[in-house]
Image: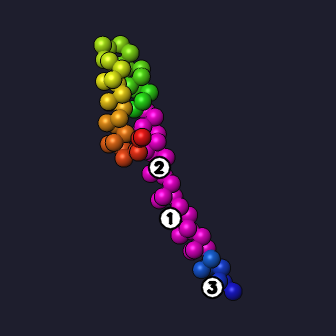
Amino acid sequence: MSTIKMLFAVSVLASLVYVGAKIIPVYMGNYQFQDAIKSEATLETYTNKTENDIRASIFHKAQGLEIPIA
């Protein structure tokens, strides 16, 4: 009976590690992208950067993080 419990515990632990390895990078990429947008919005309001330049900068950051943008 303890062998079955041990196998179950190991399988649950392995499942948690697998799900964490799939989900955590997505959340980190989202956080980095939101941070880049916030920084761009707050810092570039004091420069003479055009709207198209800001869009290009955000698009370049999204490509760097491999975020698909239509």
Task: Identify the residue at the far front of this view.
Answer: 70
- Three-letter code for the amino acid on which mark 1 is drawn: Tyr
Mark 2 or mark 1, earlier in chain: 1
Residue under pointer 3: 3
Mark 2 or mark 3, earlier in chain: 3
In the rendered image, residue 26, in percent from the top left (x then y), is placed at: 47, 49
Quadrant showing the N terminus:
bottom right
- Three-letter code for the amino acid on which mark 3 is drawn: Thr
- Quick check: can you spot residue 32? no
Q: Is residue 12 magenta?
A: yes
Q: Is mark 2 on a helix, strand or loop?
A: helix
Task: Identify the residue at the far right of this view.
Answer: 1
Task: Name the residue located 55 percent from the left edge and 68 percent from the top edge.
Answer: 15
Q: Is mark 3 on a helix, strand or loop?
A: helix
Tag in front: 1 or 3: 1
- Quick check: can you spot residue 36? yes
Residue under pointer 2: 26
